[in-house]
Image (spheres, rainbow, N blue to C red):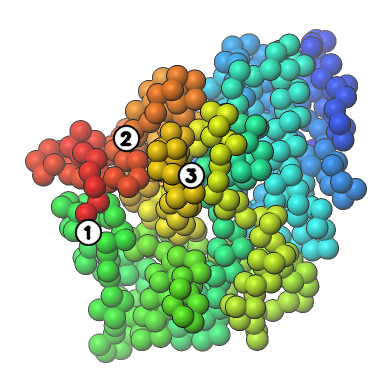
Amino acid sequence: MKTFLFFLPTLLTAATPCQILGTLSLPDTRMEFAQVIAATTMLGPGSVLVKTPDFCRVGGVIRPSSDSEIHFEVWLPASGWNGRFRGTGNGGFAGSINYSEMAAALRDGYATASTDTGHRADGIDADWALGHPEKITDFGYRAIHEMTVKAKAVIQAFYGEAPKHSFFSSCSNGGRQALMEAQRFPDDYDGILAGAPANYWTHLLVANFYASGKPMLENPASYISKDKIPAIAQAVLAACDAADGLKDGILSDPTSCHFDPDTILCKGPETDSCLTQPQADSLKRIYAGAGNPDGTLIYPGYEPGGEDGGGGWSGWITGPKAGLSAGVLFSTGFLRNMVFSNSSWTYKGTNLSDSLSAADSKMAETLNSTAANLKPFQARGGKLILYHGWSDAAIPPVNAISYYRNVTQAMGESTADSFLRLYLPPGMQHCAGGPGPNLFGQFGVLKAGDAQHDIFTSLVDWVEKGSAPSAIVATKYVKDDPANPAEMTRPVCPYPLVAKYDGGGDDKKAESFTCAAAH
């Protein structure tokens, strides 16, 4: 059994209805345990301590195929259940149950569930997929759906009633899972919060590798070390920061920034404050994304303004050395184990066109959640909120805009507006973090009952009260910890609007900004 990421409390031993759930009979499922856990303190999202109530912890294994081994857990408040269910997803290649987000959901009164999606491994490891197509199917879409169906049955058995409403919230691969649920299983959830969705999975992992990872591997002179990232970030801000009317280290609309890497070419000996021509060419590819020979875009590049910081380019794009960035490791693991199914696969001699064709033909149907017609989900009253940080160094934010536009085009602007919103927090990195205000309830309730400051509460209100969300106020806390004082607040406007400074108020306060057209 996987070790908990919290301080283990004393188990209550009295016979309870919770313990009986260990004998529950569900299709393709073997229940493993059911136990009451006393109130405790756990590590929630962002390693923030979360206090939870007494709860019933139930776990089992689902086997919808002969090669499936989907571990899942359901946590149920022993008292004070709010009548709702919240499913949680996984980042990366999954491989573990998301205890931290379950803790946050439990704290907020939700019955909650999570799954390892059918394998146990580190989230950056895809070796488990080699030779296991059924496990790839479980990871792609089946495990989250199976978890959801089983969790609702457990909830029904424990409380004697079904949840009044069901919600799903997750980011990154979890955002891909969220959109997969809306597209494939529209009856599973009433409200879905999809952050930084990796929904165009095949193009993300293939195109980004051939746009930046492979060129820097093949030509060591083009590699950009982490020591040069601060200088790049400073040059971007010098060129574009003031364009939105406020010089604050945050680009409100990075797509309007046309920074030229050649402006920081070394004029003498190379130092960390300048780029060689091969490095400048690498930087241009990172910003531009991957394209076909005819110039059409295969997948967007990364936006200027998110280069520096703990969640920036040094970890995701450049890494400690060529080939060791998180982005390259994800891409090569995907290509080796899922696309080409060859443990000896190497990038040498490969090209973008052939790799993308192979990835799309073999994996697109299983892993991509790009379908734009969400009529079944919308028709039953489902609500979908997307968010994606403009400074994301893992998944280019323009991808979320593209998906939003595709849905709007497929369903019509009026219909899309009735159930869909997109928020693009400036200065936010991957799912959270970054120089801008980056916490707004995306990991569960941040400010109870305050939909204006809490995106998850706004989703619940939209589903249950019909109150459509407008601007959400995001907060930048000291050390990005809500237990600390706020450094800055700013509205995050529903796309395509952006927050514009009024020119006279306190630029650290949300009330000094209004939502307006970008240009």
Write down the residue under mark 3.
Answer: 411
Q: Nearer the viewer, residue 369 or 235?
A: 369
Query: Which residue is disc 1 drawn over?
Result: 241
Q: Amino acid at mark 3?
A: Met
In front: label 1 or label 2: 2
Q: CA distance from mark 3 to mark 1?
A: 36 Å
Image quadrant in which you'd find residue 156: top right
Position above or below: 94 against 282: above
Disc 1 element: helix
Can the viewer see residue 145 in this picture?
yes
Give the residue at x 70% y 13%: 161
Q: Amino acid at mark 2?
A: Ala
Q: Position of residue 113 (x, y in %)?
A: 67, 31
* Residue drawn at the location 55% of the way across and 23% of the way down: 107
Residue 102 appearing in the image = no
C-alpha distance separating marks 1 and 2: 23 Å
Q: Looking at this view, is 408 or 455 the one in front?
A: 408
Pointer 3 or 2: first along the chain? 3
The amino acid on which the numbered mark 1 sits, given as a three-letter code, is Asp
Q: Is residue 237 left or right of residue 283?
A: left
As drawn, which residue projects farthest toward the left? Answer: 504
Q: Residues within 10 Å of mark 1 (few under 14, many from 20)?
A: many
Residue 465 position within the rendered picture, expressed as x and y whole percent measured from the top left? 45, 19
